[in-house]
Every structure is written in C-alpha cells, then in structure tokens.
Image (tube, helix red, strand yellow):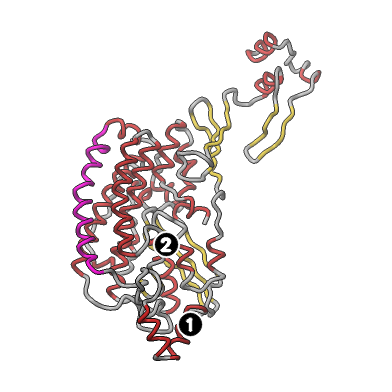
Amino acid sequence: MTTSENLSDVTTGTDTSAEGAESFEYADSRDTTEGRVYTVSGGDWDDVVSDAQHDERMVINMGPQHPSTHGVLRLVLEMEGETVTQLRSVIGYLHTGIEKNCEFRTWTQGVTFVTRMDYLAPLSTEMAYCLGVEKLLGVQAPPRAELLRVMLLEINRIGSHLVYIATGGMELGATTAMTLGFREREEVLHLLEFLTGLRMNHAFIRPGGLAQDMPEGFEEKVTEFVKVMDKRLPLYDKLFTGQPIWRNRLKGVGVLPVDACLALGVTGPILRSAGLPWDLRKTEPYSRYDEFEFDIPTSTDADCWARYLIRVEEMHQSLRIIKQVLKKLEPGPVMVEDKKIAWPAQLSIGSDGMGNSLEHVKKIMGQSMESLIHHFKLVTEGFRVPAGQVYSPVESPRGEIGAHLVSDGGTRPLRVHMREPSFVNLQSMPAMAEGGLVADVIAAVASIDPVMGGVDR
C-alpha cells in the first residue's frame, strides 16, 4: 500500500485502491487554460492528491495586480516547493489599441499615440515612428534637429535606466534604491519638461524635425544636469555594486546565454549582457550617432548582475554623448523647409505656453489668406505620404524598437505596427526562470525591465 493510500485510509477511511476507486464519486473538475482545476471539499482532497502526477505541484498566479511584475503582467507559475517548474507569461491587460488608432489620424497626429507605448522611453518610440515617416517622404531632418534628437534620446535613456534600478531594487527589498532612483529621475523629468514642455509623452519629435527649438538657456540647464548626474552616479556603485547582498541576489540568476537571446529575438542590455555588442547606435547608426564617441558595455555572464552593471555604465556613456552634442550644436532650423510637411509651421508660442502667439495668428489671418488656408489644411488634413512601406529601428533603453509603416499615398497611415522590445524580450521569461526559485522570478522580471504599455500597446 502506498503512502497516499495509508494517509487516505487513516484520515477519511476512503478506499483509494484501484478496486475501490470506482466506488465513490470523484471531485468535480473543469479544464482551464492553465490545466485542470478541481473543486474539492473534505475527503475529496485526498483523492486528488493520490491522482496527482506531482505530489508537490502548485499552480499560482503572480499578477496581474502585483507590485513586482513591472505593471499589469500575469505570470502563471507551476511550482514544486519553491522551485519554478513551468512559467507562462499572460499579457493583454493594458491593451490600448494605439496602432489601430494611428490609422484613423494624420501622420503627425500618430506621434501623440505612439509616444504612449513605452511610457518610460517615449522619445525612442517617437524617433522610430518619425524616422519611418521621413523615409517614406524622402526627407531628412535638419542637422540641428538631428543633434537635439540625440540629446533628448540620451537624457530619456538615463531616466529609463534609473526607473529600472529604482523599481528593481524595491521589488528585491532595497527601498533605498527606490528613493534614490526616483530622486535622480526627477532631475531627468524636470529637464525634459523644460526642454519639451512635458514630463512624459512629449510628442516633441515630429516628422521632419522637432515641434520647436530649444528654449533660451537650455545649454546651461543641460550642462548642470550632466554635472549633477556625474556626481550622483558613483553613489549607485557604492550602494549596490559593492554590496554583497545585492550582488548575491542577482549573480547567477536569470541566465540567458547568447544563443538563446538570438533564438528568441532578444535585444538591448539582455543581449549585450550575453556578450554580443549589438547596439543600433553603432551597428546601424541613425541621426548622426556615428559622429559620437561612446562605448558599448558588454559582459559574458548573461545574468541579472551583468544587466545591472551594463545599464549603470550605459548611463555614463549617455552623459558622454550629451556633452558631445552640446559642443557640436550650431544655429539653424529644427524642421524641414518644405511648407507642405513642416508642422507646426513657424510656431510662435503664446503667453499660455501652449497655443500660437497673437502676433502669429494676426499675421496668418490678416496678411495672407493663402497662408491661413494652408495652415488650416495642414492641421486638419495633414500632408500626403507617398505609397510604400518602411521599417525603421532605433535603440531604445530596452532594445530594438522598430516602426513598420505602410502608406497608400494618403494623409493617414494604412498600417502602423511597432516592433516593441519589451514584448519580444518577455519571451525569455520561461528560459530565465524555470528551474530557479520563485524569489528569483522577481529578479528576472526586473532585469528584463518590461513596460507593459509597450507590450500591450
């Protein structure tokens, strides 16, 4: 007689042998996407235990309302004890239909949608989208606009990596990481608000260039930001890099070697942590990135620890790029000169900081009916984009984000689809977590740094 049969006999008196199994009604069950679920009460539980293939098997949900899943992500874990034997990512709880919405707006209005996908790196999404539109139009942003785009992207990259450290640290119990990371991110958001007018979801990078030029005194503000970050970033090494608890919590956890990264299409810091120095800013430069000197940090450890070190070093490299941008900047336009494309055209901000100034409105309404009509049609209808399709990738803080745009020659996109790195990188969760402890699932999710707005978009 087996142990389970002895247990059943002692506790309930039920005959669980093969002969006796048919003499009673089995517990009710129903099949779900995660397997068979039994409704048990009283002695039924022992019958389920005796029938289970894995005596210690548990199926639990982590999320979608969970403080350690980086947003509304649901992880279905099958566990034996504290060891994860199977993991499945369940997405779709934050679906906003952004790509489909873009198809019912003008090409310029699409920027205000795509910027809300990866809300921690909105400028990267805007950049990929606008580069695609510009390729279809056959235009290139002016030199000053290209340099300012690079500066904004690198400031945004620093802010995104700071959120990775802050949230990842908090999820692993390091509350100081949260307070420090968000303290520094506030510096980033204050600067971006000064430069673009908004803390997040900027819609500042537009097809053909930028919405407007930088405000007066921006060089001093950016220089001061670089000085502050140069002073504060070494603090992260003191607090975390040399901290044995932090190191032990991440080292050897969430391992994903380079062949697995390539098989799954994983990019960004995860791929570079496995030893491949693939960064689109170097391998397929855009927006004059080939003119800057910066390094691509890599490692061969392929674990959470390596991804942490790489992101910290990437912040230092971003500061290097920002300094070089300030030296290269020269006066000039920030939007293409083609009046059929340039929107906003000759924008002059009003006293409220939002609408056109009274002088600009007076000029287009009182002096030139033709410019007023043109302005009206450009705003309401938008510009036409030649028929064709294009894929334009950029290196976001999470990896390769690409815009696949299809035009039928009209003023609206026929199709917009974003290749989102968070969505692709989440495929690596089972490979990282299965066979490890449930506590290490948290570290693995944090090291992927997914943004669910981009995953579900």
Does 142 sit above or below residue 52? below
SS class, disc 2: helix
Does 30 sit above or below residue 234? above
| Foreground label between 2 and 1 | 1
Q: Which mark is residue 125?
A: 2
Question: Measuring 35% from the left and 81% from the top, which residue is drawn there?
Answer: 359
Main secondary structure along the magenta-highlighted residues: helix
Which three-letter amino acid code belongs to the residue tagged 1? Answer: Phe
User: To which quarter of the image does residue 165 belong?
Assistant: top left
Question: Measuring 53% from the left and 71% from the top, which residue is drawn there?
Answer: 105
In the rendering, at what x and y percent does residue 112 appear?
46, 65
SS class, disc 1: helix
Task: Determine the residue located farthest toward the top in the rendered image.
Answer: 10
Compared across the picture, whether 378 is left or right of 347 comes to right
Does 2 sit above or below residue 245? above
Which three-letter amino acid code belongs to the residue tagged 2? Answer: Thr
CA gap, disc 2 and disc 1: 27 Å
The reply to whether the magenta stretch includes residue 225 is yes
Front residue of 358 and 381:
358
Q: Which residue is mark 1?
A: 376
Circle 1 packing at 10 Å, graded few (<14), some (14-19), many (20+), is: few
Question: Measuring 26% from the left and 33% from the top, which residue is drawn there?
Answer: 243
